[in-house]
Image (spheres, rainbow, N blue to C red):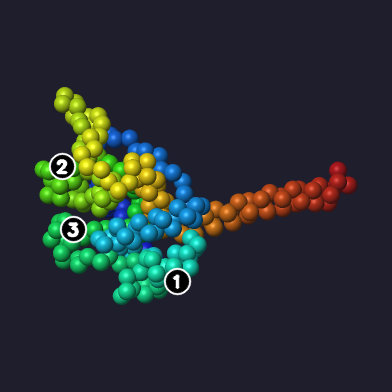
C-alpha cells in the first residue's frame, strides 16, 4: 500500500510539472472515448502499451497475469505480450536502463500505472488529457528530441507512436501564436481516423490499468443500491404494519 501511495504522489507531481511546463497553455482537451467495458479495445490497448510504452515507462503495480481480467488467456499473454526474459507473474517493467534514460531525457520516464487517475483537471478527465496529449505531437527541430506537443509544450519525450501517425508540423497564427491547423509532412502506417481509434484503445487501457476493479466495483455498487432501495420499501411497510393499531 505504501508503494502505491508513493507512486500516486509521484504521478501527481508529474501532473503538476506538466501544468507548470505548459506555461498557461489553454488548449482544449478532446473528449476520450469510454472503452472500459470493451474487452477487444482494452486488449488492443494493452498490446500498444507493451509495444510502444514499456520500452521507457514502467507500470510497476500491474502484473501481466492481471490482463486475464480483460479476456486474455495466460497463453495469449505469453505469446503476444511477454519478452522471452519476462514471466507472467512479473510487473510491467521498463526495458530502458534508468541511467541512460536520465542521460537522454534529463529524468527517468514516470511510472504510468495511475497516470490516467492523476492527470484529471479543469480541462477534463485524465483520459481526456492523455487522449489529447497522444494526438498532438508535432515536429519541432528546435527541441532536443525533434518533437513538441500542444498539450504539454516543451516536453522532453519524443513521439513514440510517430510511425503510426506519421510526421506533421503545427501551423500557428503569426500574430497571436495560437494553434491553427496541422500540416502532414510524412504519412504514417495508419490514417488519421485509424490512429485516433488506436489512441482511444490505448487510453482506455491506461484508464483501466489505474483501477482494474472499477467496472466490477461500479456493477456491484448498482446492485447494492437496488438492494437497499428494495429493503427500504419492505422496512417501511413493516414499520407501518407494526404501528397501524397505535394511535
Image coords of residue 177 (percent x, y):
18, 29
Q: Quadrant of the N terminus?
A: bottom left
- Number of marks in the rendered image: 3
Image coords of residue 11 (percent x, y):
31, 55
**Is 204 positioned to the left or the right of 102 in the image?**
right
Residue marked by disc 1:
75
The Cα atoms of the two marked residues, 2 and 3, are separated by 20 Å
Of the two numbered discs 3 and 1 in the rendering, the one whose residue sits closer to the viewer: 1
Residue 210: image quadrant is bottom left
Q: Give the mark nearest the N terminus, 2 or 3.
A: 3
Q: Is residue 84 above or below residue 153?
A: below
Give me the residue at 25% from left, 66% from top: 95
Nearer the observer, 25 or 190: 190
Nearer the observer, 155 or 201: 201
Give me the residue at 50% from left, 62% from top: 71
Q: Please tell me whether mark 1 sits on a helix, a strand or a loop.
A: helix
Furthest residue to the top?
175
**Is 38 positioned to the left or the right of 124 in the image?**
right
Of the two numbered discs 1 and 2 in the rendering, the one whose residue sits closer to the viewer: 1
Residue 221: image quadrant is bottom right
The Cα atoms of the two marked residues, 1 and 2, are separated by 42 Å
Residue marked by disc 2:
140
Can residue 247 be seen here? The reply is yes
Crowd rating for badge 3 (residues with CA inside 10 Å; few <14, some 14–19, many 20+): few
Residue 232 numbered tag: none
Give me the residue at 27% from left, 41% from top: 136
The Cα atoms of the two marked residues, 3 and 1, are separated by 35 Å
Q: Quadrant of the C terminus?
A: top right
Amino acid at each position: 500500500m505504501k508503494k502505491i501511495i508513493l507512486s500516486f504522489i509521484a504521478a501527481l507531481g508529474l501532473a503538476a510539472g506538466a501544468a507548470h511546463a505548459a506555461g498557461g497553455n489553454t488548449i482544449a482537451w478532446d473528449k476520450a472515448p469510454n472503452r472500459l467495458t470493451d474487452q477487444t479495445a482494452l486488449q488492443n490497448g494493452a498490446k500498444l502499451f507493451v509495444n510502444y510504452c514499456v520500452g521507457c515507462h514502467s507500470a510497476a503495480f500491474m502484473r501481466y497475469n492481471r490482463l486475464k481480467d480483460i479476456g486474455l488467456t495466460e497463453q495469449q499473454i505469453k505469446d503476444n505480450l511477454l519478452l522471452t526474459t519476462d514471466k507472467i507473474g512479473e510487473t510491467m517493467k521498463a526495458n530502458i536502463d534508468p541511467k541512460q534514460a536520465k542521460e537522454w531525457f534529463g529524468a527517468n520516464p514516470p511510472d504510468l500505472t495511475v497516470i490516467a487517475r492523476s492527470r484529471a483537471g479543469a480541462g477534463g478527465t485524465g483520459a481526456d488529457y492523455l487522449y489529447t496529449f497522444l494526438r498532438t505531437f508535432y515536429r519541432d527541430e528546435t527541441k532536443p528530441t525533434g518533437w513538441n506537443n500542444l498539450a504539454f509544450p516543451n516536453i522532453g519525450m519524443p513521439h513514440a507512436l510517430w510511425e503510426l501517425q506519421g510526421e506533421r508540423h503545427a501551423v500557428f497564427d503569426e500574430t497571436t501564436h495560437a494553434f491553427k491547423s496541422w500540416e502532414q509532412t510524412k504519412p504514417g502506417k495508419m490514417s488519421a481516423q485509424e490512429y485516433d481509434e488506436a489512441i482511444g484503445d490505448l487510453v482506455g487501457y491506461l484508464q483501466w490499468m489505474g483501477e482494474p476493479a472499477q467496472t466490477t466495483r461500479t456493477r456491484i455498487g448498482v446492485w447494492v443500491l437496488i438492494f437497499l432501495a428494495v429493503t427500504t420499501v419492505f422496512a417501511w411497510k413493516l414499520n407501518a404494519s407494526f404501528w397501524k393499531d397505535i394511535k
